[in-house]
Amino acid sequence: MTIRPFARFTAVALAAGTLAAALSACAPLVVGGAVMTGMVATDRRTSGTQLEDQGIELRANAAMRENFGSQVNVNPTSFNRQVLLTGEVPSEEVKRQVEQLVSRVQNVRSVVNELGVMAPSSLSQRSNDALVTGRVKASLVDSKDIFANSFNVTTARGVTYLMGRVTQREANRATEIVRGISGVQRVVRVLEIISEDELRQMQAPAASNNANPSPRN
C-alpha cells in the first residue's frame, strides 16, 4: 500500500482537530453527501458513557502512579467501560497486579490485558507507534464505507488495536484496511459487534433531527 506524504497526514490530523471542535458545538457532519449529527455519526456511546470512559482513564492512570510509580509503562484505554491495557511491565506478577488494580476502578466492567513483560519501549518505538496510529486513522478517514471515528485506534510495539461498537461488516472492512498499512505488524480487535438493525436504530434520531433542524438564534 502506498503511504501518502507526511504533509498530507498532517493535514488530516489538523482536519480531525477541527472536526472535533465542530462536534463539541454539535455541528452537523457531512459524510458522502448525507448530513448527520456529529456525535451519533462518529461515536456510538452515550454522552454519559463517554464521560465515564474519560474518568476511568484518569483514575486508572492515577492508580498506576500511586501504586507502581515509574516501575511500569501502562497505557489504559477505556471504551464503553471496557479497558484495554497496553505497555510494558517487569514481571508476570506485576502484570497480574495491574489488571486487578484496574478492574477495581470505578465503572470498569472488563479488562483486556495486552501488557508485555519486558523493558519499557524506547522513545523511538513509541514515536513510531504514534505514527502508525496516525496512518491508520488517516486511512480509515479515506474509506467511504465506514465511519472512521466509530473506531478507537491504539498501537503498541507495532500491534494495532481497534476498539468500538461496530457491525461485523465494519469490523471486517476496518481490519482489511489496517492490515495493509505500513508499520502494522498485527491487528487485534477489541470490538463490540452490533447488528445492522441496531446501527440503523442509532442513526434514526440523527436522521430525524436533520430532517427537522432546530432554529438558530
Image (tube, rainbow, N blue to C red):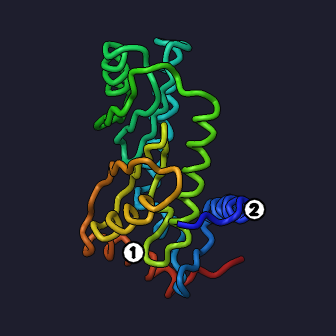
Say which quadrant the C terminus sits in. Answer: bottom right
Q: Is residue 48 above or below residue 96?
A: below
Residue hosting label 1: 203
Q: In the image, what residue occupies the spot 40% across and 46% down?
A: 79
Is disc 1 placed on a helix, strand or loop?
Answer: helix
Task: Identify the amino acid type marked 1.
Answer: Gln
Question: Which of the 4 quarters of the picture holds residue 30?
Answer: bottom right
Cα–Cα gap, marks 2 and 1: 34 Å
Residue 77 numbered mark, or none: none
The percent position of residue 216, horizontal first and vertical second, equals: 68, 78
Q: Nearer the viewer, residue 149 or 173?
A: 173
Q: In the image, what residue occupies the spot 48% across and 26% down?
A: 74
- Report whether residue 58 is seen: yes
Is the residue under label 1 in contact with that under label 2 (CB below 8 Å)? no
Q: Is residue 154 above or below residue 174?
A: above
Residue hosting label 2: 7
* Residue positioned most to the right: 7
Q: Nearer the viewer, residue 2 or 210?
A: 2
How many neighbours does mark 2 have within 10 angstroms: few (below 14), some (14-19), or many (20 or more)? Answer: few
Q: Nearer the viewer, residue 101 or 170?
A: 170
Task: Identify the amino acid type marked 2.
Answer: Ala
Question: Which of the 4 quarters of the picture holds residue 38?
Answer: bottom right
The percent position of residue 132, horizontal first and vertical second, equals: 56, 50
The percent position of residue 123, horizontal first and vertical second, equals: 64, 30
Q: Is residue 99 above or below residue 3?
A: above
Is disc 2 placed on a helix, strand or loop?
Answer: helix
Between disc 2 and disc 1, the foreground one is 2
- Nearer-N-terminus badge (2/1): 2
